[in-house]
Amino acid sequence: MLRLLEGWIKSALLEIQEYARLQSATVRGCVTRPFYFRDVVEQFEQIGIGSLTVVLLTGFFTGAVLALQTGITLDQFGARPFVGRLISASMIKELGPVLTGLMLAGRVGSGIAAELGSMVVTDQINALRTLGTDPVRKLVVPRVLAGVFMAPVLTVVANTVGIIGGWLIAVFQLRVASSLYWTSVIEGLYLEDAWMGLIKPFCLGFAIVTIGCHVGLRTHGGTQGVGRATTNAVVASSVAVIAVDFFVTRLLITLLY
């Protein structure tokens, strides 16, 4: 039992060490030459445009169900007109970034792990090294840049359609006046909330993509290993989204409020 525990601890520490080394190499690759601009643009399209549909649907229905749930609760206090304030605050500060991060973890994290894992088991990574190309600069850096910059954009999209989804439910089911809803939304927005809603996605995007790249590059065991890597990437990225959200929220509350 002790040997198993010791082996597990050593394995976990090794993974953390390798992940930290990948993060360091990635940050270094973002600020030093060579730059692969074409790969960066391609990843912007795959991560940003490719994830737009799922983010739109997630944001819309989240805002709609928020309106339904908060409408019932606020009715008990005669405060139904304040539904817009609750929806805007909830989406911008917490639900928008976290749900967008979870969608990216499921779609982007798994895709990156599967793609890089396939390259590992078919020796394409070794071929890049043989040609004198750094796999981190060529494969990881473009994906990280795209993830870091597209996550906030997708989060803003999710927040917007979420508030619109809440507006539709508030107006057509809760019978709240449209002007009253939007007034409540605007009154519920504060600069500190906007900063929190924009800073979180940068951190979540970085965590999701680097975890996907790390798991993909550590793939072994042939095609079965690619499947395991994909599953591990989704699980690890999803847990990281929740954990990073907590720590970033705690830090931002201390700094902004």
Image (tube, grey):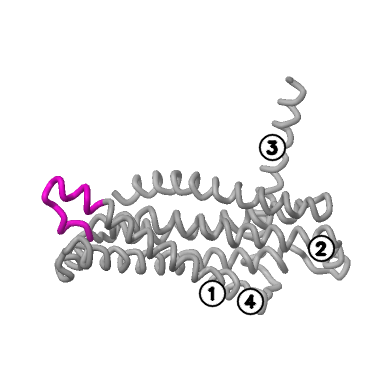
In the picture, the disc for residue 125 is 2
Dot 4: element: helix
Residue 2 is situated, as x and y percent measured from the top left of the image, at 73, 20
Q: Is residue 93 above or below residue 138?
A: above
- Label 3 and label 1: CA atoms lie apart by 36 Å
Camera-nearest residue between 191 and 220:
220
Which residue is at 35% across, 45% downward?
254
Q: Which residue is mark 4?
A: 42
Say which of marks 4 and 3 sits in front: 4
Mark 3 is surrounded, within 10 Å at the Cα level, by few (under 14), some (14 to 19) or many (20 or more) other residues, namely few
Report the disc number at residue 13: 3
Determine whether the residue tagged by mark 1 lies in a helix, strand or loop.
Answer: helix
Q: Residue 170, percent across and down?
A: 22, 63
Say if the magenta span includes residue 73: yes
Across and down, in percent, residue 218 comes to: 76, 51
Sequence-earlier tag: 3 or 1: 3
The numbered mark, 4 or 1, whose residue comes first in the sequence reads: 4
